[in-house]
Structures are given as C-alpha cells and as structure tokens.
Image (cartoon, helix red, strand yellow):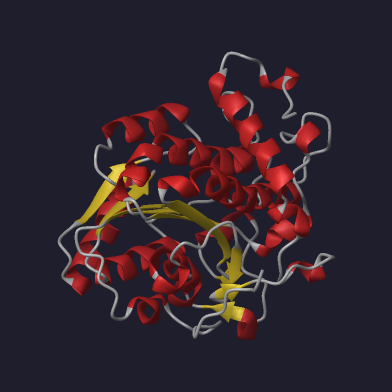
Amino acid sequence: MALITTPFGRHSTAAEIVKGIDLSSKRAIVTGAASGIGIETVRALAQTGAIVILAVRNTDAGAQVAADITATTGNQNIHVALLDLSDRDSIAKFVTQWNEPLHILVNNAGVMALPEQRTPEGWEMQFATNYLGHFALALGLHDALAADGAARIVSVSSSAHLMSPIVFDDIHFMFRPYDPWLAYGQSKTANILFAVGATARWFQDGITANALMPGAIATNLQRHTGSLKMPPEQQKTPAQGAATSVLLATSPLLEGIGGRYFEDCNEAVIVTSGSGYMSGVAPYALNSDNADRLWDGSQKIFSDFTTPLETEAIT
C-alpha cells in the first residue's frame, strides 16, 4: 500500500491547506479548541465557511476564541459547547444535545505527562482524557457522522506513541509504578489504533478516520513538563502544528482514505525502533488485532460503569 503524499510539508500552515476549499453548511466539532493548535484548527475550518463548534471545558475561554475567530474570518457560525472528556456525564450530555449531521470531528484535546491522577472510576487520567473520552464521543456521534455520508474523524496523536504500546493487562497502572511519559505514550498509541478501528468498522457508513503527529509546538500542553525542550529549529508555530489536522479534515487528497498516521502533512513511514521518539509510526499502532482488542475492551469499560476498574483489564 503506497504512502499518501501531498504538496504540503513541515512548514505548511493550516491556512495554506484550506485555500480554495469550501465547506459552507458543513458542521465540524473540534475538542480542546480554546488553546494551542485547537485554535488554529478552528480558524482554518472557519475560513472554509464551515459551522464550527468548539467543544471545551472552559467555555469562557472558548467564547473569547470564538469571538476572535469570527472577527478575523467573518464567519458568524462559530459556537461554543461544554465538554469535559474525563467526565462521562459531560460526554453523554454533549452527545444527547447534538441532533445534526456532522461532517468533521477533530479529536484534538489532550493532556501530557500528568502527575498520577485518576477519574472517579479509577481510570488513569491521560488514557481517560486523551483516548477513552474521545472514543465515547465518537461512538455517541456515530449516527450524526454517518448521516453526512462522507464524514471524517481526525485523531491527534503524537510521536510519543513510540514510547509505549498499549499495555493491555495494566493500562491504568494498577500494578506498574506510574510513569507519566509511558502513560502519555500509550494514550497516543490508542489514538492511532482508534483511527484504524473506526475506519474498519465505519467505512461502509461513509466515515473515515486518520491519526497524526502535529509536531513540536509551544503550548500549554507542556504545563506539567516545564517547557517545550525541542531546539527552536525543530519547533513549529501553532498554525504549522494545526496544518496536518486540517489536511486530514478537509483536503480532497484524503477523500476515502482512513486508518493511517500522518506527520508533516504526509503519511509517516513505519519504523522498527523508537527512533529517538521523533518520527515515524510503530507497527503496533497500526496493527488491526491491537485495534480490535482495544475497541472491544473500550466498549466493555463503557458498558459496565459499576464494575470496579481494579478488577478489570482489557482482554
């Protein structure tokens, strides 16, 4: 299977990606859209004429971003909705209130290298926020995505997936000593496997999903690590960091393409080692058996909230 290549690259911006693309009357949801590359993802989608919903925990911050984007793009259809991906009730409320076809879902929100924290259910917070919350959101919005007929899901991952596969027997660090980077890495592996699993299951519904590495961008994502430690020449601006997300969400070049992992606006090569955690995609992150195991186990978690997580492993 040939790798997907595009005319865009590492230095391309989100605005360059959407030049000439018209998504008027189409609806898009971007999670985590009140900061970082989420803002620039929304800005680029707004430039296409799309109706964009900022799904955020801080609705005051989201409202400020929406007002700025409306002022700079002229798009009046930029809206804000409350969504906390670590809270299953918040996800359920968001999904219940959605009653329109959905063209684009950008699973952008995330946390990185947190000190050990858990949800009320006992789930490790990075896995819960970065993956499980987005999994539940996408399942809840499936019918809306299918109603569009050619919907796309964008799953924001990271080169940090090269740090860890899914440790299926101890995802939530009930037995292993907690390591914030291994927890982050496996959550980002899960984001890629979601794209593989969703495309396999939903392609016949007109839904495709792809995952990506945005690049090294200085945002509040690094608030638990002190700062972005990449040399300046390896960093991107937020507009450059949003480019690959926007490419997967909007470009005609990706029509009908799913289950793949991109970086710098092109499909990444498969690597056989961690490569210094810089580039490429690990085979375990694209493995269909891993994707099936994760999908089935995730459904099991959400189908029985009363089961103590300490006794439950994804099998």
Q: Residue 52 in the image: x percent, y percent? A: 27, 56
Q: For residue 155, say whether it is visible.
A: no
Instruction: Name the spot of residue 35 as percent of width and height, x first.
Output: 41, 60
- Pick whichever, 169 or 99, lies toward us: 99
Quarter where residue 298 is shown:
top right
- The x and y percentages for residue 126 are 62, 43
Q: Is residue 189 left or right of residue 142?
A: right
Residue at 40% from the left image edge and 71% from the top image edge:
251
Examine the rendered structure and indicate whether residue 218 appears above or below residue 302.
Answer: below
Closer to us: 34 or 127: 127
**Residue at figure coordinates x 57%, y 51% from the top left:** 195
Front-most of residues 254 and 281 = 254
Residue 75, compared with residue 13, is above or below; it is: above
Please identify the quarter of the rendering in which residue 119 is found. Answer: top right
Residue at the front extreme, as displayed: 204
Q: Which residue sits furthest top?
A: 306
Say above or below: 167 vs 155. above
State which quarter of the image contains the C terminus.
top right
Residue 114 is left or right of residue 133, and the answer is right
Residue 156 left/right relative to 90: right
Please indicate, yes or no, whether residue 252 appears anywhere in the rendered image: yes
Residue drawn 50% across the image and 43% down it: 134
Kindly identify the residue that appears in the image at 42 percent across and 45 percent down.
205
Q: Is residue 110 left or right of residue 49?
A: right
The N terminus lies in quadrant: bottom right
